[in-house]
Image (cartoon, coloured by chain):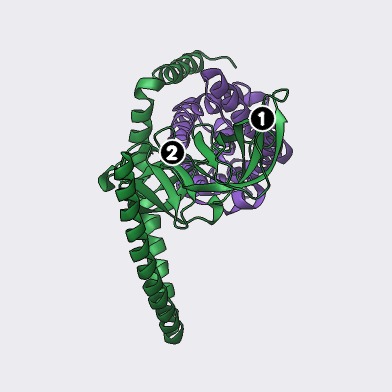
Chain colours: A purple, B green
Amino acid sequence: MRAIHPALLLLVTYLAVYLECRVTFLRDLIGVQLDILPAIVVYASLTSNLATVALLAFAGGLWFDTLSLNPAGVTVFPLLVTGMVLLWFRDLILRDQPYARHILGFAASIAVPALSLLLMLSLGAQPLIGLGTLWTLLVLGATGALATPIMFTVFDRVRLLFEFQPLEVPAYRNDREIKRGRN
Amino acid sequence: MFKRPLYIVCALALLLVVVILVVQNTWGARIKLTAGNLFLPLFGLSSTLDSGLAKAADKVTPRNVLLKELDGLRTENQRLRILGQQAQEVFLENNRLRGMLGRQQQAPWKVKAARIIGRDPANWWRMVHIDAGSRDGLTNNQPVITSDGYLVGRIGEVGHARSQVVLVGDPNCAVSVLVQETREHGVIAPSTINPLDASIVELGYLSRNSILKPDQLVVTSGMGGIFPPGIPVGRIIDYQNVGHGLYTQARVKLAMAISKVEEVWVILP
């Protein structure tokens, strides 16, 4: 049962990368292709273990680069770094608070493309960057801020379908029962 | 907070990424091709869905509309046949004259139709995926045009059933062009003012005495060996002297709008 959660995350990542390549009407409308990979990694870092985060960053990044002109592996590094940092400070993050999810999604969705661009520039690639890149990063950040809490809601609900739910302890305890009369 | 397994996995994962980035030039294309094959079922599924929807739409189209369209297509076909015969005559005459002048004869284009099935998910490249690959005779660097004959780009990487087309205006697709009216040569490059605007590119390396006017047609020059001459690229918007007046640079509005293109033609050798 435990394998279902990482498998589900991988499946959603796979579909998300494909849809980012296939569905382009929003790109034609606002000039930016939305990306939810950072939001998925944020969710995975705050709810899963190290292996899941590493697998997700590796597979998601490589799939993304495969369908893009990015050099292979250039998106893996930022996703991995983002996931590791969040995993590292997981105990200090107020992950149950909605505003924390918004902020983490926003920051991760800006950090991942910015790191990818830096890495590509250092590798000698010439991506199309200019003043419009700021608008792109802003839209990506906003997308992450919106998508991250949605990831938590949806994945948590799906998770409950496949995993054992915690037993609710009633307020009434049998061992404290006052028994009257003779036994 | 700081745990040993985390530290080890971090180091291993980063090492793996570094290895992939280092072997980029030799193994990068192969890694991408292998990983990209995972998406073939989804691309196939969406193609099947698209064709199914198109068939369903055909079935619900009224008969009188179809008959009217058929009549229009028959007329168009007859007109194009006459134009084709004329073009064939002109082509043969041109080749005879080229032969007399001792110039290399032009071969007629062989084309292969393909559908656009996706775009680059990253925001900093201009690339599309098409549903034709090496099984259809495609190889790297073949020119791609729209059904109207406008330049789209060139084939980047070729898979078995899918290829990447690098679009005009991407840094990886420099095009040698000329202004049709004045025969001035230049090179198309991404716009430096707004590189993310996919419809406008820059025409650089024009001589400083260039006499340009807005709306002049820019076509491929045939130099560079990838694009045959005479393919329309776009029209000039405006121009200015740059490099302390050493040469002229013009802004060109591309003739093809990639958001509106669904089918393309690959020119085969």
Image disc number at residue B260: none
Regarding residue B71, the answer to whether it shows in the image is yes
Q: Is residue A121 above or below residue A21?
A: above
Which chain letter goes with mark 2? B
Q: Quadrant of residue B194?
A: top right
Residue A127 in the image, given as x and y percentages of width and height: 57, 30
Disc 2: which residue = B222
Disc 1: which residue = B208
Residue B231 in the image, given as x and y percentages of width and height: 47, 47
Residue B119 in the image, given as x and y percentages of width and height: 49, 45
Front one among A157 and A146: A146
Which chain letter goes with mark 1? B
Identified by mark 1, the residue type is Arg
Residue at image location 50% in from the left, 13% down from the top? B4
**Count of number-bearing discs:** 2
Q: Quadrant of residue B243?
A: top right
In 3D space, how far apart are the residues under numbered discs 2 and 1 (Cα atoms)?
22 Å
Residue at image location 65% in from the left, 43% down from the top? A143
Labels 2 & 1 near each other (Cβ < 8 A): no
- In the displayed structure, does residue B135 sit left or right of residue A43? left
Front one among B268 and A56: B268
Regarding residue A169, the answer to whether it shows in the image is no
Q: Nearer the viewer, mark 2 or mark 1?
A: 1
Front one among B102 and A91: B102
Q: Badge 2 local density, few (<14 within 10 Å), some, or many (20+)?
A: some
